[in-house]
Structures are given as structure tokens and as C-alpha cells.
Image: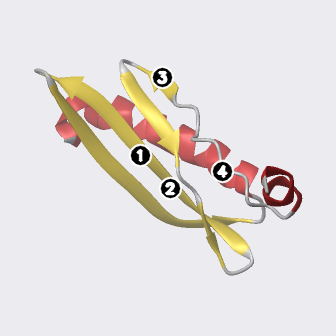
Amino acid sequence: MSFLKKLFGGAEAKAPEPETHEGFLIFSTSQKDGGTFRLGARIEKEIGGDLKVHQMIRADTFQSEEAANEAAIRKAKMLIDQMGERLF
């Protein structure tokens, strides 16, 4: 059965690797939207023992998932630089 799952795409998708910026973790979460990919990211940071999370979704669309993810990381870093912990 395992062979058939791998053959027909039943394998589990790997969780995205986070990128670290100024103590924040950035996970790209770009989503397929018709024939394009919509920019998205999840920004996390532990503050005072609590995990804080900010979901970032933008209207920007890209032809490839890779391009959307790269732009999401850039925009998330810019948002962190501008807002810092006030983001939460």
C-alpha cells in the first residue's frame, strides 16, 4: 500500500521550514488561487512564555509557488522591521 501512496501522490507534504528574522519565525504559507499563487505567511514569536502568531495574507499573486513564497518572506521581514512585537 505504501508503494501505491507514493506512486499516486498520497505521500504527506513536508511542513515548511521557517526562516528566522530578528527573533521571529516566518513560515511561508502561499496558497493556490486559480492558476496563480496568493502571497501568505505566518509570523510567530514567543513573548513572555506565550506563542504569538500573526497571519499575513496579501492580494499579490504570482505565477509560481516559489516566487510567492520568496515574496512572502521579503514582505514578512519588512513588516517585522516596521512593527516589531507590536505586530501582535
Tag 3, which secondary structure?
A: strand
The label on residue 40 is 2
In the rendered image, residue 63, in percent from the top left (x then y), is placed at 77, 65
Q: Which residue is mark 4?
A: 12
Q: Nearer the viewer, residue 7 or 48?
A: 7
Q: Nearer the viewer, residue 29 or 9?
A: 9
Q: Can you tell which quarter of the image residue 85 is in?
A: top left
The label on residue 42 is 1
Tag 1, which secondary structure?
A: strand
Of discs 4 and 2, which sits in the foreground?
4
Task: Give the residue type at disc 3.
Answer: Thr
State if disc 2 and disc 1 touch (CB < 8 Å): yes
Q: Can you tell which quarter of the image residue 78 is in?
A: top left
- The alpha-carbon separation of the residues under discs 2 and 3 comes to 16 Å
- The alpha-carbon separation of the residues under discs 1 and 2 comes to 7 Å
- The alpha-carbon separation of the residues under discs 4 and 2 comes to 21 Å
Mark 2 neighbour density, 10 Å: few (under 14) some (14–19) many (20 or more): many
Q: Upstream in the sequence, badge 1 or badge 4?
A: 4
State if disc 4 and disc 1 touch (CB < 8 Å): no
Q: Is residue 40 found left or right of 49 in the rendered image?
A: right
Q: Which residue is mark 3?
A: 20
